Amino acid sequence: MTSEATIEEVGTLLRSRGARMTRARRAVLTVLARDGGHLGAEEILGRATVLDPSVHRATVYRTLDALADLGVVQHVHVRRTGTAYHLAHGGREHLHAECRGCGAVQDLPADLLDDVVEAVGHRAGFTVEPTHVALSGLCAACAAPAGGPGEPGGGAPGR
Amino acid sequence: MTSEATIEEVGTLLRSRGARMTRARRAVLTVLARDGGHLGAEEILGRATVLDPSVHRATVYRTLDALADLGVVQHVHVRRTGTAYHLAHGGREHLHAECRGCGAVQDLPADLLDDVVEAVGHRAGFTVEPTHVALSGLCAACAAPAGGPGEPGGGAPGR
DNA sequence: GTTGTTGCAAATTGTTTGCACTGGT
DNA sequence: ACCAGTGCAAACAATTTGCAACAAC
């Protein structure tokens, strides 16, 4: 369990900024550190509530926001879940792709869009942040012609 | 004005499917054909209401949905505006990039992600649809270090 | 006349905010 | 003790849905 270590670190970071490590924040961090996946706010709320029943929905949002400010968590915009959060492991993250059929979110290598980032940077002066939104498309199962698999709930894990 | 021609065409298309060309649909199409930009639903509603005061918000959504089914309109998911709609000019479309600073949406060449699409298709079996979500990042103005421009409402047109 | 569509109002979903109180430091 | 955070309820924005009236074919 890296959870506790992480929380300890974040606590220090928070304090060093005049902020505080609270029960709610501990709960949210524990959830994020334990799972590691892409959790939606509601999802995080649910699990955090188990750890600490007093944690409130609004607090989860505020906490995630605060932690994002600190650079501790990152969020990805996914159509289905709305927004997904996960710990920022420091350096490079991975990208995400969401199937518009079944809603599954899968990870993609971080360097996938490097060329695109550079190209757009040069040609349009626009700094693309590839981790910030999930690419959209169809996963293998959902792309398959009718008759086979491809039903929601079937293929992928996650949510 | 290609508007009327377009509407005529779509009308035929609709009828050929047992659907109908109604006042509301005409209004929405007129707005889309006139502007051509990426309009949000609320925006379309507003302009359509001018053309025909009876057009209702819910109808706009249903109309956009129906037209999307026909392949007449396409939508892009943008964090700010929610969802932006525009006519599908037949073949290849352009991609979109949204500045997370000022919210400006700019177009990018359609072939920009071709390599990525292919790479992901091969390696992950995932069919990326690059036009479906806007890339996120910072536009030139907003990326510039403090002290300069980069304020909302300043840089880009559109919305 | 049939039935695809609309208008309206109310329900959903995801997220934010004002405010008085509580708990970290 | 002081003030950052919290719980709560209510506000919000974007989008959807049930249903009766309506209008395009």
Image (spheres, coloured by chain):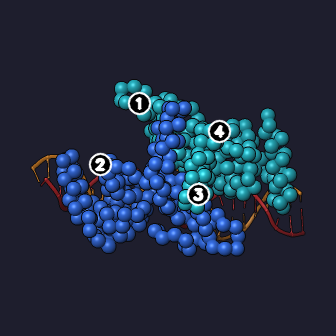
Chain colours: A cyan, B blue, C orange, D red
Left/right placement of residue A8 relative to residue B55 reads right
Q: Amino acid at mark 2?
A: Leu
SS at badge 4: loop
Q: Which mark is residue A37?
A: 4
Q: Which image quarter is the N terminus of chain B in?
A: bottom left
> Which residue is at the far top?
A148
User: Which residue, given by chain and number where applicable, does mark 2 sit on?
Assistant: B70
Name the residue located 51 percent from the left edge and 32 percent from the top edge: B122
What whole-number distance in Å separates the C-alpha atoms at marks 4 and 3?
A: 33 Å
* Whether residue B62 is situated above or below residue B2 in the rendered picture: above
Q: Which mark is residue A58?
A: none
Is the C-beta separation of discs 3 and 1 under 8 Å?
no
* Frontmost residue, C10 versus A88: A88
SS at badge 3: helix
Is the C-beta separation of discs 4 and 2 under 8 Å?
no
Q: Which of the two discs, 4 and 1, labels the residue nearer the N terminus?
A: 4
Q: Are marks 2 and 1 on the same chain?
A: no
Q: Amino acid at mark 3?
A: His
User: Which residue, given by chain and number where applicable, does mark 3 sit on?
Assistant: A122
User: Which residue, given by chain and number where applicable, does mark 1 sit on?
Assistant: A144
Residue A29 visible in the current orientation: no
Left/right placement of residue C15 relative to residue A71 reads left
Horizontal and vertical percent for residue A50? 69, 40
Q: Amino acid at mark 4?
A: Gly
